[in-house]
Each structure stands twice: as C-alpha cells, then as structure tokens.
Amino acid sequence: MTEVSKQDTIAAEGAVYYLFGATGDLARRKLFPALFSLYKEGKLAENFAVVGLARRPRTNEQFRADVHESIGEFCRYKADDAEAWERFAEHFVYMSLDINNVDGFRELARLSQGLDEKFNIPGNRLFYLALAPNLFGPVSFNLRDGGLLESQGWNRLVIEKPFGYDLESARELNQQLSQVFEESEIYRIDHYLGKEMVQNIQVLRFSNAFFEPLWNNKHIANVQISLSETVGVEERGGYYDKSGALRDMVQNHSMQMLAMIAMEPPSRLHAEDLRDEKVKALRSLRPFESAAEVNQHVIRGQYSEGSIGDKALSGYRQEDSVSPESTTETYFAARVFLDNFRWAGVPFYIRTGKRLPVKTTEVVIEFKNVPDNMLFAQRHDLAPNLLVIRVNPMEGIYIKINAKKPGVDNVVQPVSMEFCQSCMIGINTPEAYERLIYDAARGESTYFTRWDEVAEAWSFVDRIAAAWREDSSNLELYPAGSWGPKSAEELLAADGFHWWPVNGQAEDNVIWISGGPK
C-alpha cells in the first residue's frame, strides 16, 4: 500500500496539540501512531507542534525516543527514513506538569507562544486529555486561568471515556467543562465512532434504494449488536471492578451503534443534524420501569474458570485487583425496544462480554421471512435473509439470501455474498484514532458524542444499574471461552430467534463478490 498522495489530501489547519497523559498507554498505543500516520498522509499541516505533558520528568530527546519506539511497535507506517523522522520529531516537545498547579500552565502558555512563532502556528489549540475523568474539570480551569485560551485561534478540548460514572456525575462533570468551553468546543471521543464500518452505516442505509425502504418494522424481524472480546480484564482489574460491562461498553459503544442503526435520515449532512437524529433514537428507547422488568429483559454474567483452545483461563474473581467476592458483570445481554413509528415491536438484542470465544464487533439485521403460504415457503424451510455489518476485526458487509441450487430443480439453498473491505486495504486501513484526531483538528464533530447523547444513554443504563443494586442475585457465571450464560440464548429463544454466528463463522457457501480472501 503506497502512501496517500498529499495532493489529494486536505490538511488540517496548523495547531499545537497538547497531549495530557503523554507517558500513558493510550498515547503510546494509539495517539503517537495516529499522529505519525496523519503526518505521512499529509493530513497534518507542516506548521504543527505536539506538546507531551505528564508528571514524570523527560527531556525532549527522551520523549522523542518514546514516540519513535511507539511508532515502531504500533503504527501502520514505519519511521525508517532518518531524515524524514527528524523533520517529524522536531515538532515534538515535552514538559513536566503538575496539573493542579496553575503556575505550570502559565509556563506552558509561554512555551506555546514560542512554538507558534517557531512553526508559524496561528494560535490554534487542541487539548487532548488522556486522563482520569475527575481531572477534566481541574485541567480545564487551569487552562483558562493559565492563559492557554487567550490566543487568536480556535480552542478544542478532546476527552476520553468514561464521561462520568452515572447521569449525576456526568452532569457535574459537564457543568465544570461548560464553565470553560462551549459545547461546540468539546469533543467527546468514542473510538467506535471512528471505525470505518460504523461510519459506513449511514452510507449503507441512505445511499442504497433497496435498504432504506426496508429499514423498518414491516420488514425487519430483529437487530443483533454484538461486541465480544477474548481478553479478560488484563491490568485493568482495579478500574473494571468499579465499572463493569454496563458502564465500560454498553453506555457508550453499544448505545452509539444502536443509535446509528436506528436513527432517522438527517435532513442535511451536517454534524448537528446527524447527532440530533441519534438523540431522538436514544430518547425512543423504552425505559425499564422496575427491577422485575430488568430481570426479564437483561442478562448479567461473570466469567469463571475456563479455556480458549488449549489455554486454561482463570476466572474473573482470580484476576489481579479484583475482589474475590466481586459481583461485577463481565457480560451483558439485553432485549430493548424503541417506541417510535419505524421500530415499534422490533427487538434489538445487545450483547457484550469478556473471555468470549472470538473477538468481533458485528451488527446483524435479520429480515422477516416471506409468508408461510407462498410456494417455496410451503416446500422448503427457508432461512431468513440477513444483512451483517462487520466492524472489527474483519471490516465489510455480508448478505445472505435464498437461491436455487444449481443443477437441481426447485431446490432452494442459502447463498452468501460478502464484501470484505479489510481484505482489499489490508493492514493499512486507517485506525479509528487517526480519523477522530483528524476530524477534531478540522472542527468536524459528526463522530463525537454530544452532551445530550451522553445524558440519554446514562438515563437508560442508570435504571439497569439501580435494579442490580436492588437485587444482586441475578449474576450468572459462565465459563471463560464460552458465549456467555445460557439465559442469553433463552432470551432470544423466547421470541423465536437465536444469536447468529459472528466473525465469518457462518456455515453456508460464500460467493465473494468483491475484495475476497487473498
């Protein structure tokens, strides 16, 4: 894969990028590689600077060596041209900063003025807070009081999840940020919204005449959204035991994907119009009114000892920094409904979990079958038509239809067609953080979450969390390496459905119409 021609690329305006938490894992794995990829593809203007900020001491040379090591390990491009690397690295500087000391921010403002002059930057500032959420407010206040927001250019604040622990804490956090930044200046990252096939959902729906007319309760039987992980909690046991799958995955990633699938067509291709429609979809979610309703529609699980292949795996309660009596859920499945004209009566099934058999993110749209008294339905057990949007790790679209078996009179068989996008692009497909940093630098907010989206998602999941606090006996153990509690299968079976295979595990024949396996 050759680099994108810089003549075909619109570079973001020149700016200073401030990476708070520059010595952390997110910066090493995602942010430094993303910035280098954007630079290689001409998406960063030549007049930019990156300031790494953290408490531990580092020289500029040490910081640049850290960035180089990060790129070598995690970036899809290699920094193997020494001269080109030096040109890139000279834009990186480091400053040790106590984020509770406003004097340090004043010193940072003086450093910023020097960088503006050195690289001819027009005063634009992008502050990326790869920090704990309880630090968002204090850092914002010190950015203001330290004079960082007084330049002539634009100011943008990029913050990572989790955005609060519940609706109340999220409101408090948002009130703090709103004292310093306008809503239009706040970019809340949900990296799932940066994934290629999530962004492709609206194109798939609204650019194809044979999808959107069928995208409703007259033709769709159910929707299944799966976000499965093979890993356990790894080194995150202390954080995860206070969070769980509900807050770590459902409130943000699952709700955002549901909104993208369920929303109405926006009136214009503007960021605010698209986000307006996502909010409307989230407001249409039928809330759970009691603990009994939660128990009826929601499955809560935790992995116990098990195995994947020949590898023995410990249970969640044996993980580091996890309480041996923990009731934190590592698996979540739910049946939810949207009470609006388009989706009334259609169940949306959501599941996410750790220590499941495969890592995948997929959306399955199962269409209603033809009437039973139709000719072929009378003679054959017809399989339902499926549209599968594969988000990760395979990216593409999978469609299953019924067709005549070749050479045999009136024998119907399921036939699958697949467009494999990642097969064509390979490892050089842009990473989610690249897209999102590039968008934030251009002021493109479409794939960032607005405050009212965050609030609606918290309002929905808070009712589930409250029901679990009222009754904690509904936690089910499942063996690591399995597909979760058996009750998750029963949840769909009660409606006459089942979970469809994911990650290319379907057993029927596949016709590769484009981008097939190499």
Image (cartoon, rainbow, N blue to C red):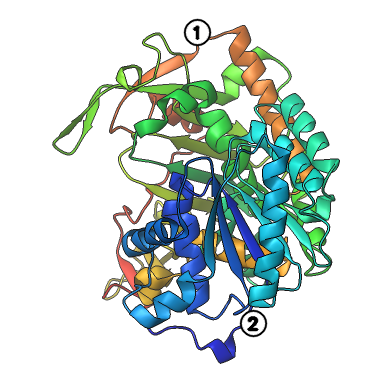
- Measured as percent of width and height from the top left, residue 341 is found at 80, 47
Q: Quadrant of the C terminus?
A: bottom left
Q: Out of 296 and 329, give the one closest to the viewer.
A: 329
Q: Residue at x 80, y 47 (%)?
A: 144
Q: Secondary structure at mark 2?
A: loop
- Measured as percent of width and height from the top left, residue 191 is found at 56, 52
- Mark 1: amino acid: Ser
Per the model, the C-alpha gap separating discs 2 and 1 is 55 Å
Q: Quadrant of residue 457?
A: top right
Q: Residue at x 28, y 33 (%)?
A: 481
Crowd class of label 2 (few under 14; some 14 to 19; many from 20; radius 10 Å): few
Q: Quadrant of residue 81?
A: bottom left
Task: Tell me if 447 is positioned left or right of 331 in this view.
Answer: right
Q: Residue at x 48, y 39 (%)?
A: 497
- Mark 2: amino acid: Ile
Q: Out of 215 and 103, give the one closest to the viewer.
A: 103
Residue marked by disc 2: 10
Q: Residue at x 36, y 68 (%)?
A: 410
Q: Out of 306 and 170, give the one closest to the viewer.
A: 170
- Measured as percent of width and height from the top left, residue 365 is found at 54, 53
Of labels 2 and 1, the one closer to you: 2
Q: Out of 13 and 149, give the one closest to the viewer.
A: 149
The disc, 2 or 1, on the residue closer to the chain's N-terminal end is 2
Q: Secondary structure at mark 1?
A: loop
Q: Quadrant of residue 126?
A: bottom right
- Measured as percent of width and height from the top left, residue 370 is found at 55, 56
Query: Which labelled disc corresponds to residue 473?
Result: 1
Residue 212 visible to the viewer: no
